[in-house]
Image: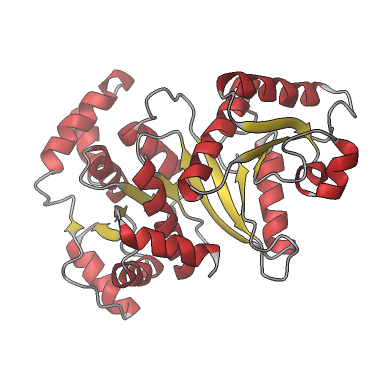
Amino acid sequence: MSILEIFRTRAKRQPKKIVFPEAQDARILQAVRRIHEAGVARPILVGSKGAIATACSRAGVTLDPAIPLYDPASASETDSFIAEYYQLRKAKGMTQAQARLEIRRPLVFGAMLVRNQLADACIAGAACPTSDTIRAALRCVGTAIGSKLLSSFFLMVPPESSPFAGSPLLFADCAVNPEPTPPQLAQIAIQTAASFRALFPDAEPCVAMLSFSTKGSASHPKVDLVREAARIAAQKAPRLVLDGELQLDAAIVESIAHSKAPGSLVAGRANILIFPDLSAGNIGYKLVQRFARAEAIGPFFQGLAAPVNDLSRGCSVSDIFDTAAVTSLLAAKS
């Protein structure tokens, strides 16, 4: 059984209510039908009832009438959401009229459903940029208690032909923070370890703080940044198995780890890779996805009070389905 099949099986045991605010997208409709029938989550749609009916007709999709549908134009929650959103945003200059317009947007309405615990999570991004999803998440859901940073991770699943088959990795941060400071990079490492535990409760997170240097093999301010981040993370989470700075090969190849980082508890066995900045992370996950043909699922946001996750605008129905299964597991631990 593949790791994704295991996730789907686990998600079915405790399916979570997930909002899909892009309900006029044919891929979303097809995925929602599949998600509902498979039972990996309990989907909720947001949007104009008439427009969604038209989109279903065009896509040839028949949805179970039991799937909840919220129309911001007529939902009983709309007025209370407007008042609440206005209170959240008035210090930033928002007027009540602007709050009313914002709540009519399905993405904002969906995020407010999560805020008010009428849903456990939200998935968007098939038809809007990541920045829109992040903005709605931060404004409506907010960050978790004790967290001031939103970050992200990708779940990378190597193909069966790979020497790393059966050993999925989490890559972070590949979607949000362009140039994290040492404290932020340390927080990303700790957040990603928590995400790993939610997805792999029977495995130990093993975090490599990546650099172009291994244990002082090079000297540069960017190496110092990673080294300082590793020190801060170790101080804040002393029980976490973490090491850095490590080059990629030393982090995941045991034979190289023995020569480059002897004695390291992480080198050669890392299952979480923390990239020093967004350029490295974004390029890195796409290289592994395209050249190694690994499945790249995500990005999944971290540091929020409840899960709000992103889709690529080029996502497939299968991508949406798997994102829903993983989101159900993350919501169970949030």
Q: Which residue is drawn at 72% across and 71% down?
A: 161
Quarter of the image with the C terminus is top left
Up/down of 165 relative to 88, above or below: below
Q: Which of 80 and 161 is in front in this view?
A: 161
The residue furthest bottom is 60
Q: Which residue is drawn at 12% across and 36% down?
A: 80
Res. 181 visible in picture = no
Res. 239 visible in picture = yes
Give coordinates of residue 98: x percent, y percent: 24, 34
Give coordinates of residue 248: x percent, y percent: 78, 43
Please count the marks in the image.
Answer: 0
Judging from the image, the colouring scheme is secondary structure
Which of the 4 image quadrants contains residue 167? bottom right
Up/down of 145 relative to 177, above or below: above
Side of 71 relative to 168 (left or right): left
Side of 233 relative to 333 (left or right): right
Q: Residue at x 78, y 35 (%)?
A: 246
Give coordinates of residue 48: x percent, y percent: 21, 59
Up/down of 22 relative to 31, above or below: above
Side of 301 relative to 173 (left or right): left
Q: Which residue is drawn at 55% across and 38% down?
A: 193
Give coordinates of residue 95: x percent, y percent: 23, 27
